[in-house]
Image (tube, rainbow, N blue to C red):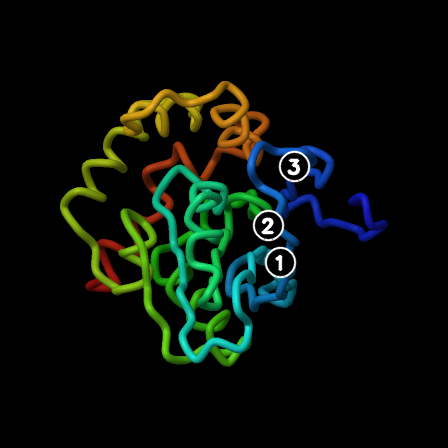
Amino acid sequence: MDLFGHDILSEILRTPIAAFINLLDYPFQPNYIDLLNPGSIGDGKTKLRLHYLDEGNKSSPETILLLYGEPSWSYLYRHFIPKLKKYRVIAVDLIGFGKSDKPANNNDYTYQRHVNWIREFIENLNLDNITLFCQDLGSLVGYGKISKGFIQWLDFVSQQTEMDVGRVIKSGVIRDMKQEEIDAYNTPFPNEQYQYITINRNRYQKSITYDNL
């Protein structure tokens, strides 16, 4: 049962909302949409809840879609969003990350499913005239192409037994990060169970090998 009184299947992990309260520089209103689940959860009939931010000028003819890279979440774009306020700005937490649902079964994660979920999200919100800003996993989902660099990343995470997301982000940032920021990146992944998508290389192996993407 979550904070809203909803029953949550044991096969779906959902980081408690309380964990996200008062994160540094993250004052944004949460939004949620239910997506189709093609995996094993409830014989594929159980909806997966995806979290996204919808900020800026909602009447703008142009939408900027922000898709982060592994192992981050929409918190990465907290400083981007205010600077883009003259546009409609949408930052998504992919399934398995951030405030979005996290299937516990490794077979429920494939690269193609990430692509399908984002496509369904865009169609359900009737988004058009989109400017895509992305990197790493976000670019693979946005453009539909597996890169050598992403395979190298999967090789790296396959050697990890747990993932300190904040430390990984800090290693790629040139400025000094506050401890509150580092902690915020770790918030969606309180233990190894929630970190499955960040440390299991094989979650995309089938789609990379057989989907010819």
Please state the total of marks drawn on the protein image: 3
Distance from Cα at disc 1 to Cα at disc 3: 16 Å
Residue in view at x 65 percent, y 37 percent: 20
The residue carrying mark 3 is 20
- First reached walking from the N terminus: tag 2 or tag 1: 1
| Res 106 seen here | yes
The residue carrying mark 2 is 101
- Residue type at numbered disc 1: Arg
Is 46 on the left or on the right of 156, as rendered?
right
Q: Residues within 10 Å of mark 2 (few under 14, many from 20)?
A: many
Q: Nearer the viewer, residue 138 or 156?
A: 138
The residue carrying mark 1 is 49
- Residue type at numbered disc 2: Asp
Residue in view at x 43 percent, y 41 percent: 76
Can you say which quadrant of the picture contains the N terminus? top right
Residue in view at x 65 percent, y 43 percent: 14
Q: Residue 156, position in %: x, y?
A: 26, 29
Query: In terms of secondary structure, where does tag 1 sit?
Result: strand
Q: Residue 36, position in %: x, y?
A: 56, 68
- Residue type at numbered disc 3: Phe
- In this view, 179 is above or below 71: above
- Check whether the beta carbons of the residues at disc 1 and disc 3 lie within 8 A of each other: no
- First reached walking from the N terminus: tag 1 or tag 3: 3
- Check whether the beta carbons of the residues at disc 2 and disc 1 lie within 8 A of each other: yes
Distance from Cα at disc 3 to Cα at disc 2: 14 Å
Q: Residue 79, position in %: x, y?
A: 45, 43
Query: In terms of secondary structure, where does tag 3 sit?
Result: helix
